[in-house]
Every structure is written in structure tokens, then in C-alpha cells.
Amino acid sequence: MSKTIIVSNRLPVKITEKEGEYLLNPSEGGLATGLGSIYREGYNIWIGWPGIDVHEDAQPRIREQLGEMNLMPVYLTQEEIINYYEGFSNEVLWPVFHYMSVYARYEQIYWDFYFQVNIKFRDAILQVAEPGDVIWIHDYQLLLLPGMVRGSLPDVAIGYFQHIPFPSFELFRLIPWRAEILEGMLGADLLGFHTFDDSHHFLNAVTRLLPVNATSNVVLVNDRAVVAETFPMGIDNDKFEILSSDPEVLRQLDSLRENFQHTHMVLSIDRLDYSKGIIQRLEAFELFLQLYPEYVEKVVLYMIVVPSRDTVPQYKELKETIDRIVGGVNARFRTMNWHPVNYFYRSFPVETLSALYNFADVGLVTPMRDGMNLVSKEYIASRINNTGVLILSEMAGASKELIDALIVNPNNIGAIARALHEGLNMPEEEQARRMKPMRQVVSKFNISHWVKLFMTRLQEVKQMQQSMLARRMSIEMQKHVLRDYKAVAKRAIFLDYDGTLVGFNVDIDAASPDKDLYQLLKDLSDDPANQVVMISGRKHETLGQWVGHMNLDLIAEHGAWHKKQGEEWQKLPGLTDQWKQDIQPILETYTDRTPGSFIEEKSFSLVWHYRKVESGLGELRANELMNTLRYFTSDIGLQLLPGDKVIEIKNVEINKGKATLAWLQDREFEFKLAIGDDYTDEDIFKALPQDAVTIKVGSQVSAAKYYLRNYLEVRSFLRSLIA
């Protein structure tokens, strides 16, 4: 039986120590609830750190107790907790990923421990993982783990989910170990993020920092398709709906009504963190009381800040600043029987939170950056009467779903103050009109929907990888082709040049054949049964200079010129280059605007190259150029060919497929082979009959039957035919 292994930094239990005895209580977190349906079943298992430094003597006993709950501990030493968790995770990744890079400390010792602890987690997985298992890794503390597991278990299904934002490339590149982090993440088959922006930032970082290509949201890593996808995380919606009618909650609700009889409540709940925008929220509330003095004694900000890491200097400083501002606002505005800010620095049981969610007229959730923010969803889920107003920061992932909230920029305290005024004055019909669609979203996209969606997509990605592997030319398939090759007396072999027989070179004139390639072509063409045709987009002069002396037929410039061995170049009749005078100025304009780009002129085509252009800018200009050229070329018989960092404009009659068919005319061959890597080579694959062996270099979608990874594999395959 295959099983699912969930891996996160923390296990879903709270362990407390009392006089050497350890007590275990399941935790209430949203993730624990959502994944409970998985890890409690069958042989499934959840691996993580128990949350405290367990004495060595007690470790076997706790492992056994946890085992009964399908949990498996990874024990960390105090030194590991300080450097891996408090150090690298929370002093490098957390600030950079939340756009607060000024707080980041790039210490080598942090990285060393982060690497070491990820290996510890890998070893724990390897103890229980078997082929066919699904491994789901969670969050930024374990970014290296997918790659480490992939190295040991290449065929296992690995999912990774990022619960915090993924920063833009400009911020992410500040991290000294950025490439290693991305390589670790790419060990997964499916990478999940809360928002489209996060997945987009990840793909941008990967393509700019690593030598990999991405097509839409699929990255190709050594022939394995890795998918980055958006999965907005939900909450246990039913739990909060049911809590709203719980007797204990109703009792606390009555007590709130009594205490705040004629007062509106604005509710704010956060963990102590600089990413939560707590100071700006307090400043906005102070401004609100200044701008709308009629609300004195009529509104209260009920502010809960849950303690977190308050021994760390910047958190300690934040706590002191909050205390000072709360004291200032209360001193300035309070009256004999009214405190504007009711501030609590502690955590509350879920029943109390539910009563507050039900009572508060306004939920104020304005983080500076947040992956999702589930407090906003808990507030919505609790409002079973469809009343209440949610004021939500546009920097929280939840704002992409809860679009009927009052969306604000958390840095704009004036906008927050105005939103408070609007929220407190909003008619009930308007509240219901906004609340109903948000409640539907929270109800439909709940935590179990999120889990199901992720797991289903992971299976689809594995199937997609399998179908790509089926086309990959395995050793078995190569043997099969070799048998067919040996069995016949007349063979036609069509070979593209750039990207197929040689790697790409930034300098297009530096890609001339090497000694090894000359020998390979000589050996292929020396076999009397073989007719070898080099079919390339290269200029006919260049191709003639490089391989014109060999026993090959040549087709150059995508079919505009052809040359039989020992004869002169012939050009395709009826071609004109009059159109160049209209198109050349357009290309020159784009070349002037794009440093690193250049124009290559062939007899009957023009090529705009952008392989030397800064990544991102080249693609942008290429898209602009394509759109401009489409307008000019549609009615004058020209074709646009986007290739690898090139755009080629040529006559419609020029086509590698047509050139191949023309060459084959009136000749009979028992075996036909074509290898190419480009958009233009698809025409050859389509033109050849069903029984031909067609091979694409690189594993993108193609009309070819098989694919090989790169030019080195092509050479090795051709050598096997000769041998």
C-alpha cells in the first residue's frame, strides 16, 4: 500500500513538560485540521519537530506515544533550534519573504545549520518512505528538503506548499544561498503558493537565476516537468459556523453585549510580528478619533496581540512601541468610563475568539505582507447572520479572494481611517450584499477543498511526467530504431544544425563544427546506404563554408537554398526580397531600443536575435516586435517564426517541410530519420510519413515521435547507429 507522508517544521501536537513528565495534546491549527483527514488514516504519517527540546532519555518513549497518533518526531538540539529555526528561517527567510529585508542577517552559521537540519528531516523521511509514496512538504523552514529527497528517491511524488509570500526577484536575489534554495524547491513535482503573484515571482526567480526554461507555469528540470500552481488555502469553515451557536460562545457573547452596550467594536487579532502592520493600524485608529470626534465613547478597538519571539531585539522593540502607542491613544482620548483601545498581549481560547468574531462590527486585518491571513476568513465564517464589515489589506493573499471586503493599502493610514468610518456607517443591506459572496467563497474553498485540490493536481503532474517519459528515447527504443536502421539498404537522414548537433552559442558565428562533429558526419555519410541532408536556418554561405566539402546534401535558410553534394547552390525559384526594405527599418528601431540585440540578414529572410539581451527585456521586446510585424506581414506573403531567442521573417513559400518533400521527390527510401530542435523543424516532422523516425531535441510539445535531451544525446545516438 502506498502512503502519504506529511512533513512540516512542527508536529500538530503541543508537548508540555512537567517535572520530567511530558504531556501530549493535539493542536488546533488550521493546517492540522485540514491534514487530519490524511495523516490519521491507514499507514500515513506526519513527520516534524515536537516543538521542544526533549531530553535524550525521554525520546524513545515520546516517539512511541507519537507513533500511536501516526506522528514521527525529528528531535532538534538547542543549537539547531537557535541557528536553523530562529536563525536562518526567521532572520533570513522570514524578513526577505515579507519584504522587510532590512531585518535580514545573512550569517554563514545559520545556513550551515539550516542545511544540516534539512538533512535530518530527509533521513527521517528515508526511514519510512517507499516507492509509490506521496510526500507533501510544508513551508519555508524546509526549502532544501524536496531536492534532498529527490536525490535519494528519484521516482517518488513530492509536493511542496509555501505558506508565506514568495518575494519578487529583486528581493529574493539578496539571499547569498538563493540558487541552492531554488534547486532544493525544484526537487518537488508540484509547488503550491497562495496567490498567482507568489507563483509568478517564483518562476521569475528560477528562470533568471538557474539555467532552466519555463513555459507558462511548467519548469523543465532534467526532463522532469515541475509545475508551480496557485492554491489559496482555506479554513475549517464548519468549525467556526458551529462555534457561533456553541453554549459557551453564546454565554461570552452575552457578556460582551453587557460590557459594550452602546459601543461599536473594531476587532484586531495578530501574532506579534513586524509584517502585521500593528503600529500603522493603531496610528490609523488614532487618526480616526481625531477626524471623527463624534465617535469618542462610541467605538472601541479590541486588540489582541499573541506573544511571539519577544526575546528577539526587533520583536521586543516592536512590543515596546505598541505598548507606548496604545498608552498614548488611551491617555489622549479616554473618558471616565471608556478606553478607546482594549489591548491584550496574550492568546485566547477559540470560544472567546468566536464570541469576538460574532460581536465585532468591523474586522480590521491590515498586514504589511501576509501569505494568506486566515483571521479574515475566520471572521467571515463566524458571521452567520451576514452582518459585519471586513477591512482587509491588499497585501494579504486573502484580498485576492475576498474582493467584497473594504480593501486598503496598509501604509495609508488615512485610507484605513476612512474605511473605519465607512464600515461603521454601512447599512445592513450593504453589509449583507458584501458578506454573502465572501461567505460563499470561504465555505467553498475550505481547508479540505484545498487539500483535495493539491493532492489531485499532484497526481495529474505525475501522469504528465509519465507521458513525457514515454516519449523520451530510452535505450530500449534506441535499440529498436537501430534494428530497423540495420535492416535496410537505403536511408535518408535529415539533421538540423544549431541546438541539434551543436549547443547554442551567444555569438552565432562561433558555433562552427568541432573535430568530433566533423568525424561523426564523415562516418555517417561514408556509409553507402546513407543519404545525409543537413537542413538548417543558417545562411547558405556559412553552411557551405563549414560543411560544403563533405559528402552531404545541404538545405540552407529553411529551404530557400539547396545544394547537392559536389554541385553548386540552387535557389528556390520565384522568391523575392523586395519586402526587406519595409521590414528592415522596423527591426532597426527595435535594435536601437534593445541593447544586445542584432539583425542577421539572409538572402530571403531577416532575423532579429535577442540572446544577448537582459532576461525579461528580450522577451518583452520580442512580443512587442511580433505584434508590430503581424500587422505588416499578414497580407504580403511573409511568415513570422519565433525561435530560441530569435524571430525570423521569411517568405511563406520557404519551409523546411516543403524543402524536405521536394528533396525526397522521385526517390525511394526504406528508412527515414529526422532530428531537430526548433519550431521550424516541426514542418519536417509533419511532412514525413508515419513510419519515419522523428526526434525532437528538448521535451516541449512536438509532432515528433521521440525526444532527446540535448545535442550531446543526439551525437551519442548517431554514434550508436554507426557503431
Image (spheres, rainbow, N blue to C red):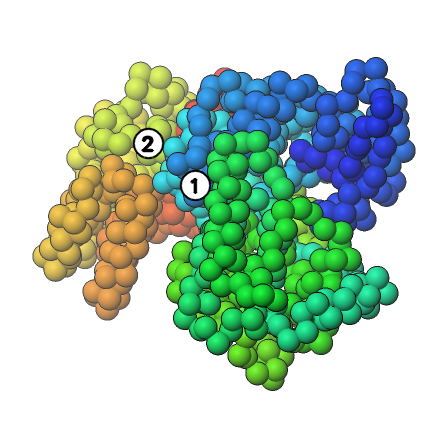
Instruction: Judge whether 116 appears above or below 367 on screen.
Output: above
Q: Which residue is at 44% across, 32% downward?
A: 104
Amino acid bearing label 1: Met
Q: Which residue is mark 2?
A: 504
Q: Is residue 619 left or right of residue 388?
A: left
Q: Residues within 10 Å of mark 2 (few under 14, many from 20)?
A: some
Q: Nearer the viewer, residue 637 or 278?
A: 278
Q: Residues within 10 Å of mark 1 (few under 14, many from 20)?
A: some
The label number, if any, that marks residue 100 in the structure image:
1
2 or 1: mark nearer the eye: 1
Q: Nearer the viewer, residue 567 or 675?
A: 675
Q: Is residue 2 left or right of residue 503?
A: right
Q: Position of residue 337 (x, y in %)?
A: 61, 66
Q: Which residue is at 76% across, 66% downward?
A: 255
Amino acid bearing label 2: Phe
**Res. 681 in view:** no
Q: Which residue is at 51% across, 18% downward?
A: 109
Label 2 to label 1: alpha-carbon separation: 39 Å
Q: Position of residue 644 (x, y in %)?
A: 34, 42
